[in-house]
Image (cartoon, rainbow, N blue to C red):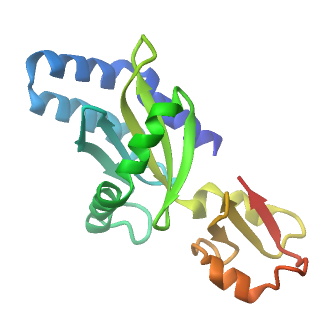
Amino acid sequence: MEEILTASKAASYNPIIKESYQLYKKNGRRAEIYNDVSQFVNQQYKYDRHLLCAMVFFLDEPENIFYTYNTYLENNSKTSGYSRVVEFQNNSIADVLELSAGLDTREALITNNGHLYMVRNLVGSDFQPYGMIVIELSPQFVFESLTSVWGAMEYEVFLDDTPLLDSSFGEKTDLDRIRAAVDPGVTSSSTKVRV
């Protein structure tokens, strides 16, 4: 998880996105900001197996999302990669924008419709947010170190009360399935990880 946190900071601390945005506000040249920001996002995030998709947008134009997706992961083809952006726009962007107001310079994890996102504000030198980076994480790879916990035969990962992953190697869990499989009053040999 530390690698993803560090990677998210690149969008904040590297001046490329901020300078491209400031130039765009002055000259209105959409092609320039598209090229600059898209190139940065691709270079920083496209080949990281911990993420499925990385998106950057500006708070005054949240409908214009600069994105990349990891095409090396199974079932993350060009079509499904773009569908992640559409899914985010249709179902999660309002929640992320609401979260932005109180986020300051911290990161947050949120889940929505089976997707796990790490979100972070992009802030200017005045520490005021001007944009956001949203990284859709691959729980299978982010939490893969759990497979090496000695003595753990099964595990489940939750964010608050939302199941993210279980020991069936990457399958997102269904809370009702878990409750049906394990009597809540009985302690099992599984490892429960709360983040």
Q: Residue at x 79, y 65 (%)?
A: 192
In the image, residue 92 lies at what x, y percent?
A: 39, 55
Q: Is residue 5 left or right of residue 36?
A: right
Quarter location, residue 82: bottom left
Q: Residue furthest top?
A: 126
Q: Is residue 189 left or right of residue 53?
A: right
In the image, residue 5 lies at what x, y percent?
A: 57, 38
Q: Residue at x 61, y 75 (%)?
A: 173
Q: Is residue 77 above or below residue 137?
A: below
Quarter location, residue 57: top left
Q: Is residue 129 above or below residue 172?
A: above
Q: Residue at x 35, y 60 (%)?
A: 91
Near-viewer residue (182 or 32): 182
In the image, residue 41 lies at what x, y percent?
A: 34, 38
Quarter location, residue 182: bottom right
In the image, residue 136 lies at what x, y percent?
A: 46, 53
Q: Residue furthest bottom?
A: 180
Q: In the rendered picture of this protein, how many numbered marks are placed on residues?
A: 0
Q: Is residue 56 left or right of residue 103?
A: left
Near-viewer residue (183 or 87): 183
Q: Residue at x 43, y 70 (%)?
A: 74
Near-viewer residue (46 or 57): 57
